Image (cartoon, grey):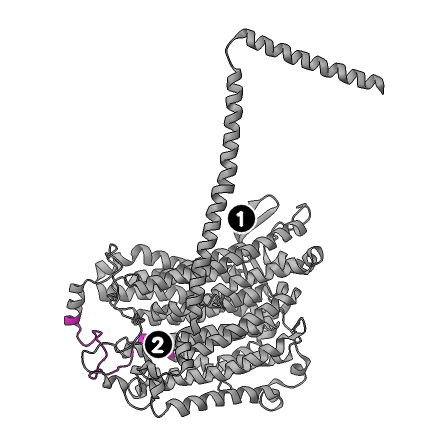
Amino acid sequence: MQDDIFKLIWWVLALPLFGFLFQALMGKLVIDNLGPKIGRTMMGAFAVLPILGSFAIAANITAALRALPEDGRSRILTLFEWITVGNLSIPFEVRVDALSMTMVLIITGIGTLIHLYATGYMSEEKDYTRFFTYLNLFVCAMLLLVLGNNLALLFVGWEGVGVCSYLLIGFWYKDLNNSFAANKAFIVNRIGDWGLSLGIFFLMFMAATTLGVTGQGSDPRWLSYDVLLPNIGVMLENYGHWPLAAAAILLFIGAMGKSAQFPLYLWLPDAMAGPTPVSALIHAATMVTSGVFLLNRMSPLFEAVPVAGAVVVIVGCITALLGALIAFGQTDIKKVLAFSTVSQLGYMFIACGVGAYWVGLFHVATHAFFKALLFLGSGAVIHAMAHNQDMRNYGKLSKYIPITFGTMTIGWLAIAGFPFLSGAFSKEEILLETFASKLNWYGLPIGLIGFGVAMLVAVLTAAYMTRMTFMTFFSGEERWKLIPAHAGHGHDDHHDHDHHHGDHGHHDHGPDVHNFFYTDAEMAEIAKRTPHEHHHDLDENHKPHEVPATMWIPLVVLAALSLVGGGWLFFGVQLPEWLASAGVVVHHHEEIKSIPYWIQKVLAKPIFWAATAAFLLGVAWGYARYFKGLPEKDGVDETKWTGFQKAASKQFGIDGTLTWGSINLGKILGDISMAFDKYVIDGIVNGLGGLSKGFGNLFRSMQTGYVRGYAVLMQIGIVALLGYFIYITMIGGAN
């Protein structure tokens, strides 16, 4: 009877799927029959409720799981047999344990808030339900990714979130910038998915020969985590270090794609072209954390091959530092947050690489709180500023949008590392674990290198986030008032995409055959009907305004989580022990266990003071440079920028170089593939066909139809057989 509650996990998966189907099949019908206002309100509710229901069920399941003994906190439930090939069985099965349920709560909890926010943010879209169709399907795919109990289901969920991210980033597909961004995300992720696929096949081969050769007395589910992971040691004995390390590194390449690690980070900044709720859900709280989840789930594999951990740390260090530096050159508020996400993801991988997998997931949770808050807050700022995203046109917004200002201030302090806020807890744990790590690679102290980079990035994070906050809410005058009326948006980039009506008129992507967007006539009618809500160009007459309740309520909830979430996860949930029950590798340092945590946190550990110093140093730099006003070297005239800022604004040339290299590499690989296909594959096929044709012609020429010809051939055959038997007899007699 106690286990019956775990069967409810199928509803956690099913509710978002039903929400997706309802939006797709009934959305247009409901709105057309009930009218835009009532219909959208109803469809918005039906978009939020499935995710909220999944969260409520998941919370009950998690409570039941915590009530069990630590060694019994795992349940595997099978819905049906999915794939059976020879000795291999891949059922459609889910795993209910501490790791999967932690991710489920993040996905559905943060997802509910973002869905609620989106009902207000996207309320003026003509094809309102198409957005929620994609959003519900994305949540369903993400839940399958984290709940699936085998690598095959993980791959299905992995590809599902990739497809949904493509649809959501390119939601306003009539703007070519959005279409290009969606294509870029899809293509770059294919590179990572190639690595993931090869890694799974490597493990499948090794598992097949180790666990599934005979199929007698062994579990045929050798791609399921509960069978595969306990046998990593056996596979290591059979195959040695390097084959297993190759599989781990290939899996990590998959993680690099989804979690935007260098050099596969290129897609994430461009993905900011999509609607802000998409940025918050996909690129702050869920999809980009898939790689960290994968490393936690496969931690026994990475723990068995330290070289893979060293690769993870090195890539994480490059990503964390690069993302932080590039953020200083961005003027688009969402681009700053995008590169901040890249940097923070690198932080998570540094922790996982040194073996502190639980700390990486700890930062996933706290990052979901404050980064979702910052993204949604940036959307509120953009909404207030006539959809202008250039921070150089902001200034002194604190008095116009006090709720947004208050909540975003908490998000800024949390990510910057203000003591005892959520971000400070997880960041200090990363610093502590990297400093204590003994990881070495060919004499290089990888752990200490990770610690040094993490400390530097902590300072940079506090600095660029202070820059963003002060440019938006302080920095002297109200700079939009300096823009003459009818002067346009007044910024130099082409990423002003957060429009609501769908008239993304920078570029025309062809006819609107699906009737997804408003026509010019419909736009004019809307402007007449609701002139106070119509979105105009930013000018001296503009007056910013606060967002509606559906948008600021999620901000308040996320601000509360950013305040207390880190302490609650560490002290209340006791995250290391909680995740250890799911098979995540957790190292306990004796110096941590020997002193009560609260005392060592405040008094006994220099890490606390080092992290606090990093926070103070970064904030002090930002205050000195931006509080009184926007410096000339950060202004609209980019010719006065410093060389560093100019280079950072262009990503130090990395995006263009890697994109150019990828295009040319793709062309070269394409040419090689075409040549191989033409001269090898087609050559073999054509050669076999020609050989068959030659033999056919030969034998056809022998079929003359004359009886005397066949008689001669029979005589030749008989003589040949007699000769063979005489030869065999003579050889036998000689012996």
Which residue lies at the image location 57% right of the left edge and 44% below the top edge?
85
* Secondary structure, magenta segment, majority class: loop
Asked if residue 553 shows in the view, the reply is no
In the rendered structure, does residue 538 fall within the stretch colored magenta? Answer: yes
Q: Who is closer to the viewer here, 580 or 619?
A: 619
Relative to 469, is 126 on the left or the right? left
In the rendered structure, does residue 637 fall within the stretch colored magenta? Answer: no
Relative to 184, is 1 on the left or the right? right
Which segment did they paint magenta?
A: 527-555
Q: Residue 148, percent across and down?
A: 52, 58
Q: Is residue 294 above or below residue 719?
A: below
Secondary structure beneath label 2? loop
Q: Is residue 626 above or below residue 440?
A: below
Relative to 168, is 433 on the left or the right? right
Real-space CA distance between mark 2 and mark 1, rounded to the nearest whole angstrom: 49 Å
* Amino acid at the residue labelled 1: Glu
Per the image, the residue denoted by label 2 is 332
Q: Residue 33, percent across and down?
A: 22, 58
Picture quadrant of residue 1: bottom right
Picture quadrant of residue 454: bottom right
* Amino acid at the residue labelled 2: Asp
Which residue lies at the image location 35% right of the left edge and 93% below the top edge?
628
Labels 2 and 1: the sequence-earlier one:
1
Q: Residue 60, percent across and down?
A: 49, 68
Relative to 688, is 596 on the left or the right? right
Q: Who is closer to the viewer here, 553 or 711?
A: 711
Per the image, the residue denoted by label 1 is 81
Q: Residue 21, percent across and down?
A: 36, 56
Quick check: marks 2 and 1 in contact, CB under 8 Å?
A: no
Q: Is residue 325 above or below residue 85?
A: below
